[in-house]
Amino acid sequence: MRLFLVSPFLYKKKLDMENDLLLSLVDKYDSPLYVYDADKIEEKYNILIDGFSNVEKLKLNYAMKALSNISILKIFKKLGAGLDTVSIQEVKLGMKAGFAPEEIIFTPNGVGFEELEQAVELGVQINIDNISILELFGQKYPEVPVCIRINPHVMGGGNRKISVGHIDSKFGISIHQLPLMLRVVENTKMRINGIHMHTGSDILDIDTFIIASNILFNAATSFKNLEFIDLGSGFKVAYKDGDIKTDIKQLGEQLSTRFNKFCEDYGRSLTLMFEPGKFLVSESGKFLAKVNVIKQTTSSVFAGVNTGFNHLIRPMFYDAYHHITNISHPNGRKRFYSVVGYICETDTFASNRQISEISEGDILCFHNAGAYCFSMSSNFNSRYKPAEVLLYKGKDYLIRERETFEDLLAKQIEIDLD
Ligand SMILES: Cc1ncc(COP(=O)(O)O)c(C=O)c1O
C-alpha cells in the first residue's frame, strides 16, 4: 500500500494552487522567468543547522556562485549564514548585501595575486589553494591569518566536471605536500587559522565525506592556531523521483561525533564550517518557459520553448536532469516529448520525456532551477537574460528585470568604419 503524508486529494490541490500561482506570475512578468521561494531556502538552511546541532560552533557559508542575486544574498544574511565566494566581485556583492568582511570566506582558484591583495584590503577570510601563492602571501602578509585549501585526493562528485578533490584536479594543495606547507608556514611565520577541503558536488556516498574529513582532521593536527575547519560542500539533492540524496541526519550524526572527538584531541573547540550552494537553493527555484512550437519529425515530437541553454545550461553542460511539468495542462494524457531550446546549436533540455500533453502556448516548469541556472546564464545568440522573481512572506517581488535591447548594447562600442 502506498502511504501519503497528505491525502492525494490535498496533494493535488496544493500542486494546482502552486501551478496557478506560477501561471499568474508569467501573466504578470512574462516568460522565460525564474521564480524562487524564500520559504524553501529557509527550510533547507534549517535542515543543515539541525543536522549538525551537536556541534558547538557551526557556520554555514552560502556558496553564492549557485545563485547570486543580491536579494537572495540578503535572505542568507537574515538567516545568519556567512558567504563562500570565489571572485573579488562576489566578495563585493556580498558586502553590498550587508555581509561583514569577517563573514566572508574567499576561495579563489588560479587568480592573479592582485585579487588576493584586494581581498586583504577588504578584510575577508582568505583561503589559499596553491603552494607558491602560500609562500608569496606568507612573505608579504605574515600577519594576515589565512586558511589553506587541501586536496585530499578523494574521488567524489556526481560527474567528472564537478569532482574536484581527485589527483588530477587543479584545486587545493595536495595532502602529500603537507611537509612543504608546514615548511612555508614555519619560514614565513604566517598564521594558518583554518583548513578547508571541497571534494565536489553531488556526492552520492556519506563515506566519501567521512573518508575525506578524516584526512583533513589528521592534517589539521599539524597546525597549532586553527580556529575553524571547513569541510566544503557537495550535499546531493534529488532532481527526480527515486534519486539518491545526501542523508543530512545520518551525515550530521556521524560527522559531528567525529568532529567533536577531533576538537577534544586538538584541545580546543573549533568552528565547523560548510559552504553549500546547491543544497540550499536548488529546490527553491522554478524556471518557467512558454512552448513556441510543437514539431513532429519522423522520430520525435519536439516541444520547442522560448529559452535555451543560454538561460539554463545544466542539461547540455553536465547532462543534468531537470524535472519538467506542463503547468498549463497538468492533467492531460502523458505523451513523450523532446524538450528543446531555440539556440542555434543542439539545445536539448530533455529527451523522450513523459509530460502531460503539450500545446503551443503552454507554460512548462523546469524544477530544481535555483542552483547554477540563472548564475550560469549568458547572452548567447544575443538573447536577453530572463527576469527573476522572489516569493517572500506571501508576496512576489521582481528581483531582476528582464534585459532589454539597450542592455545588449550597454558595453559595446560602435566604431565608425568609414
Ligand atoms: C569551493 C566550493 N565550495 C562550495 C561549492 C558549492 O558546492 P555545492 O553547490 O555542491 O553545494 C563549490 C561548487 O562549485 C565550490 O567550488
Image (cartoon, grey):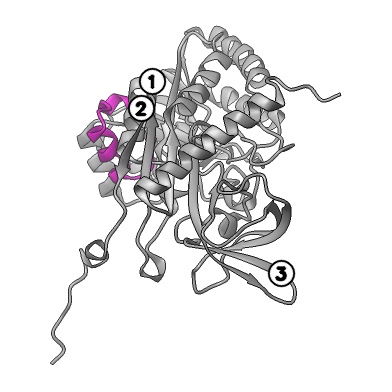
Query: Could you tell me which quadrant the N terminus lies in?
Result: top right
Q: Amino acid at mark 1?
A: Leu
Q: Is the Cβ of the residue at disc 1 closer than 8 Å to that at disc 2?
A: yes
SS assignment at label 2: helix
Residue 157: x and y, percent?
A: 63, 42
SS assignment at label 3: loop
Residue at image mark 3: 300
Q: CA distance from mark 1 to mark 2?
A: 6 Å
Q: CA distance from mark 3 to mark 2?
A: 43 Å
Q: Which residues are the magenta region?
A: 83-103
SS assignment at label 1: helix
Q: Amino acid at mark 3?
A: Ser
Residue at image mark 2: 75
Q: Is mark 1 within 8 Å of ligand 1?
A: no
Q: Is the Cβ of the residue at disc 3 closer than 8 Å to that at disc 2?
A: no
Residue at image mark 1: 79
Query: How many numbered marks are there?
Result: 3
Residue drawn at 59 percent across, 60 percent down: 359
Q: Is the Cβ of the residue at disc 3 closer than 8 Å to that at disc 1?
A: no
- Residue 67, image quadrant: top left
Q: CA distance from mark 3 to mark 1?
A: 47 Å
Query: Could you tell me which quadrant the C terminus lies in?
Result: bottom left
